[in-house]
């Protein structure tokens, strides 16, 4: 009886395995007597890749990975690549469905949410998704928005993605180009574009979508342009090696006029002895136009000249300002913050400085910023600076000294993954003032307006982390902790440390010499 039970259990297991892994998966693992054309291409194998279920695709790729079905030719390898691509599309479709399902738990009527705002539900979904998948909230917002569109209005596009007819990138194009199309025109747009989407790469699909949406859109381009202009913006994106991207979303004629003006000024600066390329000249001219009050001298920042720079923050911090005057704009003063090691500021070392909202910048760039600074703040790394870092229960709002200290200590919003500079955040009490929380450095953390709202209106809950920073508990029951930033480089190996060690050794040597010297009488 025991033996029979065991055999029955094994049979059930085999039966269940065969149900979960269709026959095509095993055919692909074991191979088949396919028909080859004159070029040695197994057309049946190629057809099996296009028609295989996700299980079959997994089986084929597992067989290749384990060596059970080693591809021996380029066509066979290309079939595997296509199988991986189809499987990635299927996975992307499942991700879209699951993200949309996460959003259903963020419904304002759900017990873990308060308030009727649907935008709060979307924000909560974005925060949960970004933390789980370790994405920026901008990327997570695009993913959530796209997933809701695919599972809502563009279900045929989702089906094509799930089947592998189109890839995730092309599905994103269809979603993006369908935005602002009235509901009654979306289905026609989707039906037409899916007829060709499988045979077009992303740039060609984008161009085809733009033409099609113009033909199908019931509103005039003029009316749509008025609404789109409300989204105009300027975006700053840090990049590597002390550089960054500055881009602007503008009405087409304004963007072209700016580029034409910059290009014309750059070309006028070209001469036989000009070492800079035309793209370099355009970049230098644009910086001068924005920072130099309209001058187009095209100063070369790599040659040691000023780039119409504002001022910097020095010694440890200096305040940077720059005037900007343009058509239709009032003169204004911009402030930037850069933290500079004192010996680097003096030119004794070349340790990088820290530019707020960006990160490390070269020492010579920081010295240029500091040269024109109009205000300074001494900020020593030792905690006893003389600033008022704690207030008693008689004051709710922090002092400027305390606000500055917390902003410099945390650098960014304290929410997991958020990189908004602390200077543009609210200061929030970790233990609420109403619950006897104090207005002190150990109970204050910066939180951008979005995450400040999430903390107070949803189940996102912060708590102190023993290693520094905050641990956030999400409505989904997961915890996320941003580890504290390590010091820049090895403190023991830094140039500043070497100078201080040298000074200490010299002082001790001098003291010993004084002690050993004979008395004067």
Image (cartoon, rainbow, N blue to C red):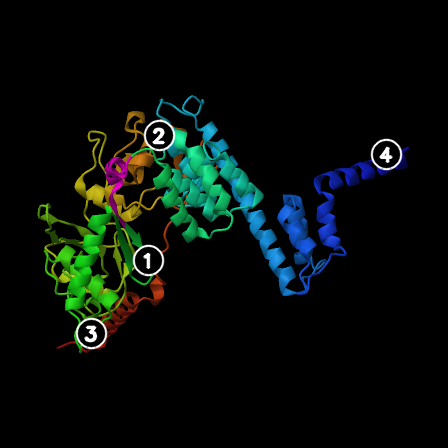
Circle number at residue 5:
4
Residue bounds of the magenta highlight: 220-235
Would you name the residue on which mark 3 appears? 514
Labels 2 and 1: the sequence-earlier one: 2
Q: CA distance from mark 3 to mark 2?
A: 73 Å
Q: Nearer the viewer, mark 4 or mark 3?
A: 4
| Real-space Cα separation, disc 4 to disc 1, in angstroms | 64 Å
- Marks 1 and 3: CB-CB under 8 Å? no
SS class, disc 2: helix
Q: Residue 321 versus residue 223: which sits nearer the camera?
A: 223
Q: Mark 4 and 1 residues: CB-CB less than 8 Å, in contact?
A: no
Circle 1 packing at 10 Å, graded few (<14), some (14-19), many (20+), is few
Mark 4–mark 3 Cα distance, whole angstroms, equals: 94 Å
| Residue 164 spot, x, y in % from top left | 56, 46
Position above or below: 278 against 391: below
- Tell me if residue 207 is in the magenta stretch: no
Tell me which corner region of the image, top left, top right, bottom left or bottom right, holds residue 141: top left
Magenta stretch prevailing secondary structure: helix
Secondary structure beneath label 1: loop
The residue closer to the viewer here, 441 or 143, is: 143
Q: Name the disc covering residue 280, or none.
A: none
Query: Of all residues shown, which one is farthest toward the front?
Result: 215
Q: Earlier in the sequence, mark 4 or mark 1?
A: 4
> In the figure, residue 43 lies in which quadrant?
bottom right
Q: Is residue 5 left or right of residue 198?
A: right
Q: Which residue is mark 1?
A: 239
Tell me which label, 4 or 3, sits earlier in the chain.
4
Q: Residues within 10 Å of mark 2 (few under 14, many from 20)?
A: few
């Amino acid at each position: 009886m025991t033996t029979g039970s065991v055999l029955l259990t094994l049979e059930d297991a085999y039966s269940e395995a065969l149900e979960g892994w269709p026959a095509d998966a095993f055919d692909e693992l074991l191979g088949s007597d396919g028909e080859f054309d004159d070029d040695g291409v197994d057309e049946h194998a190629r057809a099996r890749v296009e028609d295989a279920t996700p299980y079959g695709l997994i089986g084929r790729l597992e067989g290749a990975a384990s060596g059970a079905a080693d591809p021996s030719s380029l066509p066979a390898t290309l079939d595997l690549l296509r199988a991986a691509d189809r499987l990635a599309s299927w996975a992307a479709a499942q991700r879209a469905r699951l993200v949309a399902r996460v959003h259903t738990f963020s419904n304002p009527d759900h017990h873990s949410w308060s308030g009727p705002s649907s935008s709060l539900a979307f924000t909560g979904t974005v925060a949960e998704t970004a933390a789980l998948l370790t994405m920026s909230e901008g990327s997570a917002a695009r993913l959530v928005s796209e997933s809701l569109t695919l599972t809502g209005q563009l279900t045929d596009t989702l089906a094509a993605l799930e089947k592998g007819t189109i890839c995730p990138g092309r599905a994103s194009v269809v979603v993006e180009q369908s935005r602002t199309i009235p509901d009654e025109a979306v289905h026609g747009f989707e039906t037409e574009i899916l007829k060709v989407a499988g045979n077009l790469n992303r740039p060609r699909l984008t161009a085809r979508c733009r033409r099609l949406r113009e033909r199908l859109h019931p509103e005039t381009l003029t009316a749509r342009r008025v609404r789109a202009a409300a989204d105009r913006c300027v975006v700053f994106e840090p990049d590597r090696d002390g550089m960054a991207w500055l881009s602007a979303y503008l009405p087409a004629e304004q963007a072209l006029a700016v580029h034409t003006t910059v290009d014309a000024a750059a070309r006028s600066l070209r001469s036989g002895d000009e070492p800079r390329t035309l793209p370099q000249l355009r970049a230098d001219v644009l910086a001068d136009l924005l920072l130099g009050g309209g001058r187009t001298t095209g100063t070369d920042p790599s040659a040691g000249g000023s780039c119409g720079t504002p001022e910097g923050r020095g010694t440890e911090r200096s305040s940077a300002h720059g005037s900007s005057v343009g058509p239709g704009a009032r003169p204004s003063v911009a402030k930037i913050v850069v933290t500079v090691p004192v010996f680097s500021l003096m030119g004794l070392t070349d340790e990088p400085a820290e530019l707020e909202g960006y990160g490390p910048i070269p020492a010579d760039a920081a010295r240029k910023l500091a040269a024109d600074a109009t205000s300074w703040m001494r900020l020593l790394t030792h905690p006893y600076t003389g600033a008022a870092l704690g207030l008693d229960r008689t004051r709710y709002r922090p002092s400027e000294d305390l606000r500055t200290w917390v902003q410099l200590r945390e650098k960014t919003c304290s929410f997991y993954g958020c990189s908004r500079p602390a200077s543009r955040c609210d200061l929030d009490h970790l233990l609420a003032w109403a619950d006897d929380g104090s207005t002190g450095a150990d109970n204050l953390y910066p939180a951008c307006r979005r995450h400040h709202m999430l903390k107070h209106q949803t189940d996102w809950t912060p708590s102190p982390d023993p290693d520094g920073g905050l641990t956030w508990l999400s409505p989904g029951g997961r915890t996320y902790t941003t580890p504290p930033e390590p010091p820049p480089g090895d403190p023991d190996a830094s140039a500043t440390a070497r100078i201080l060690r040298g000074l200490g050794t010299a002082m001790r040597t001098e003291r010993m010499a004084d002690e050993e010297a004979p008395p004067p009488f």
